Image (cartoon, grey):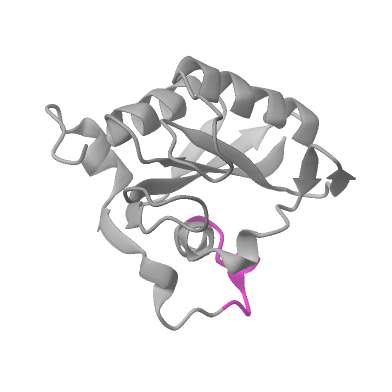
Amino acid sequence: MTRAFLGLGSNLGDRMGYLKGAVAAIDDCVAVSGVYETDPVGGPEQGPYLNVVAELDTSRSARSLLGLCGALEASADRVREVRWGPRTLDVDVLWVDGETVDEPDLAVPHPRMRERAFVMVPMGELAPDLVAGWSDPGAGGCRRLGDWDELASQSGGAVS
């Protein structure tokens, strides 16, 4: 089994509901970071995102994980109209221990993860070894809303 990390974000509709549905569908997920609300990076004007990082203990390759990401996005009815535009669900392969991929449709480790506080801050909760040496004094607009287990168990959407 291999340690891997996925980044998940949502800024349309029931943001927490989309994240909960995706995490529940990842059968080899072993931990989820706290939930962060973050300002969008790039793209058109849009609302804030909810972001988490999920840790997996998996036998899947990076390529197989990319397929899983696409399936999770499809189950959330993600529509790709504008690059970096608003979305119901965005899922990225961030890291797979011992695997490096540099292909047109997949790069692992994720090539921009160290530029994004919304990845590095929650990843630091799960894998401090992977964020060693990274610093972002302003935390890039990341606002921690609470623990995953607490927020995911709330019904009625205290965070939507």
Residue range corresponding to the magenta coloring: 126-134
Residue occupying the far bottom of the picture: 137
Queried whether the magenta region covers residue 2, the answer comes back as: no
- Residue at 69% x, 30% y is 65
| Residue 72 in the image, given as x and y percentages of width and height | 53, 23
Residue 68: name its quadrant: top right
Image position, residue 57 (x, y; %):
62, 36
The image quadrant where one finds the N terminus is top right
Q: Nearer the viewer, residue 92 or 98?
A: 92
Residue 16 as seen in the image, left or right of residue 68: left
Residue at point 32%, 48% (across, down):
47
- Front position in the image: 60 or 70: 70
Does 52 sit left or right of 74 as displayed? left
Residue 42, horizontal then vertical, whole percent: 52, 57
Quarter placement of the C terminus? top left
Q: Is residue 144 above or below residue 4?
A: below
